[in-house]
Image (spheres, rainbow, N blue to C red):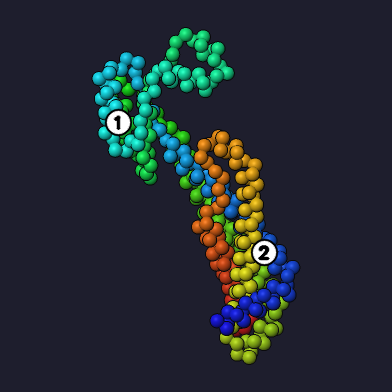
Amino acid sequence: MKLLTRAFRIAFSNIKSSIDVCAVSVITIMLAFSILELFLLVFANLNSLVETWNNQVQLIVYLDDSVSKKDQNKLENLITNNKNVKASSFVSKGQAWTDFKKTFSDKAAILDSLGFNPLPASLRLQFTYSSDRLIYIKEFAKTLESLKGVESVEYGKNWILKFETFLAFLRLFLMAVGGLLILGLILIISNTIKLSIYSRKEEIQLMALLGARPNFIKWPFLMEGMLQALVGALLSLGVIKIVYLYMKLQFQDSMASLFRGVYIQFIPDTFAVLILLGSLFSGWLGSYIAINRFLKSELK
């Protein structure tokens, strides 16, 4: 405990004596983490949007105009007996046409001039949510398509699969960017600590000659690097919080009107904690590389 207290006191003194160099290092770290957190902010909100859409996934069964009552009853019984179906509703041809005309009310004159209703009756199914829901929706859709009286089925599988593929790519991209930024931070911190070490070269050599152990020499520099990285990460979270509040103020109403139930979210707490832990690790590693090299080359 005494070693850590002493290391913290010396690290703080070192930062005060070279405040300009440390400020540049902290700002650079802040900018690097801000880039990563901006990607995380976008990813978190895209993920939330997909989850909302997934909760609203429907399977629409379009019926032939010539479907018999017997075939329709058989179809409805099959749907009722499926434990994964949460709710179902029947939309007649007339109701479908009325809803369509309400949606495109500005084209009402053109629609009325058709003189007939081109839309089929349909059954709309909602499913209980689970991680493998799309799999059993796909299987049930194949079963329904083979039934007599069914014209076609639709559940938006193409855009869901494409969007999930995009999210998988985004996850890999974030991991790659995060890895490169961490590597860059380690190099930045290592070079900053190297400057601090060489400014105290004679002092370190004297401590070594007096018999100071390597850990006694290393810890203040390790603490200095960790403090710089932690302060930079905390500042970056503050910057992204401001960006988040601006986005929420400017775009939340538009998001709510376009995507019902979707709200702009901040970076999840788990990611924020990982960022802070990552900053401490990169600060420690960068400092360790710098002080270790110095001790090996100068104090053989």
Disc 1 element: helix
Looking at the image, can residue 296 be seen?
A: no
Give the residue displayed 69% in from the left and 77% down from the top.
Answer: 13
Q: Is residue 25 left or right of residue 133?
A: right
Give the residue displayed 28% in from the left and 17% down from the top.
Answer: 68
Q: Which residue is mark 2?
A: 26
Looking at the image, can residue 275 be seen?
A: yes
Q: Is residue 148 above or below residue 174?
A: above
Measured from the top left, where is residue 94 in percent x and y?
Answer: 42, 17
* Disc 1/disc 2 C-alpha distance (Å): 61 Å
Give the residue displayed 71% in from the left and 64% down from the top.
Answer: 24
Give the residue displayed 50% in from the left and 49% down from the top.
Answer: 171
- Res 21 quadrant in image: bottom right
Q: Which callout, 1 or 2, points to the residue nearer the camera? A: 1
Residue at the bottom extreme?
210
Disc 2 element: helix
Q: Earlier in the sequence, mark 1 or mark 2?
A: 2
Query: Which quadrant holds the C terminus?
Result: bottom right
The amino acid on which the numbered mark 1 sits, given as a three-letter code, is Ile
Q: Residues within 10 Å of mark 1 (few under 14, many from 20)?
A: some
Q: Which residue is mark 1?
A: 79
Query: Which quadrant holds the N terminus?
Result: bottom right
Measured from the top left, where is residue 88 in percent x and y?
Answer: 35, 30
Q: Is residue 89 left or right of residue 284?
A: left
- Res 123 quadrant in image: top left
Measured from the top left, where is residue 85 in percent x and y?
Answer: 33, 35
Q: Nearer the viewer, residue 41 or 157?
A: 41
The amino acid on which the numbered mark 2 sits, given as a three-letter code, is Val
- The tag on residue 233 is none
Q: How many marks?
A: 2
